[in-house]
Amino acid sequence: MNIVVKPEIIRGLRKNKPIPVEAIAKKLEISVDEYNDLETNGKELDQKTAQKLAFMYGRNWTVFLLNEAPAKPNYDEDHRTVTNQKTGLGYKTYEALEEADYLIDFIVNISDETENKIPIFTTKLSPKEMAEAFRRETGLSVEKQPDFKSTSEAIKYWIIKLSKLDINVSSYQLGEDDGIRAFSLYRKSKGIIVLNTDETDNGKIFSLMHELCHILLRNTGVCDLNRSVIESYCNQFASEMLIPTSLFEEFLERYEVSADNADETAIKIARRLRVSRLAVLTRLLNAKIISPRLYDTLSAEEYKKFNSLRQAKKARQEKSRASNKPAMINPYVVNKARIGNLFLGELFNAYHSGKITPFEAGKYLGFKPDKINKFNEWATSNGD
């Protein structure tokens, strides 16, 4: 059976989810010119090709039977760079954004929670004041915060604490070329923070605190940590949460920090607090202990090191693909990270109580109904 792909439908789908033309053409195994002709004049496609095209937009082939393209989900204000605003986000990032959007809406609808546990603040407070107020309101005092043995332990600590506020944390592989480190969404009394699986642990924990700030301000969306006013504010909040001023001043005195020993001291403080060296250097810059010139030099070294690690990881992945040895991926691990511990628990509870059908549960859990109980058993025995 052939499907008539109307040009207005395909144009509307790509307007809502602007996947690069080159990526679509490659997936369909056609030229860019052939794809452009499809958007201009439409065409009959066989059902398999139509389904492949619709799937890239998260739709069924029946979308091409509509008279107009379905509306784009109503995402909150985002903070993309000028480049991203011009070109749109990559396919993987949009997939993650759309899936997270549907997931949080579904969780809100099935939740019995009536109390909003997430505090709300405004930028009338300084980032430092907001971090201190958040700690007071939630009982997360600096004194009670444990000395973390690793950055991954620190991430787990904060994920558990945020879940008590009904803020879920999940992980996706976001678009490699988007520059998107994380994003967040807020609905009624629920929040979700999505971290990039390709980030380092230090990068993840900073993004976690940065996105927490967006949720507390009720200003969520896609975030690439650019230098807009709100992004700068959230960066400062994250820095204060991870390197509280009281501890920072204590370290400055203990290590007698100066421009001469700033680099080695930044490494010591970073290890002690399980944060990035760059985060500490930023605090030293703001405290006027190091000059902007020295900061640029040291931060350039840090970015160079990060890019080397990223390139090495990419080379290993390409080598693995070239060897034709498929990577062993545990679907339980992937789906648990994709959904997040808090929302995963809510989905299982709703399924077992009969609040949602097996079909609905399977749709969001990522498994067929007959596999849900096994996933539940695995998730319970592998809880963090």
Image (tube, grey):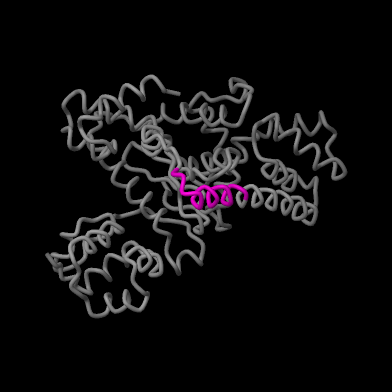
Asked whether 253 or 379 is in front, the reply is 379
* Residue 61 in the figure: left or right of residue 196: left
- The residue that appears at 15% across and 67% down in the rendered structure is 3
Q: How many marks?
A: 0
Quarter of the rendering occupied by the N terminus: bottom left
Residue 227 placed where, x, y %?
58, 57
Q: Residue furthest right?
A: 260
- The residue that appears at 48% across and 59% down in the rendered structure is 80
Asked if residue 1 is positioned above or below residue 302 in the image, the reply reads below
Residue 299 placed where, x, y %?
72, 51
Q: Is residue 360 magenta?
A: no
Q: Secondary structure of the magenta portion, mostly?
A: helix
Residue 82 placed where, x, y %?
51, 66
Q: Is residue 324 magenta?
A: yes
What residue span does the magenta drawing correspond to? 312-326
Quarter of the rendering occupied by the C terminus: top left
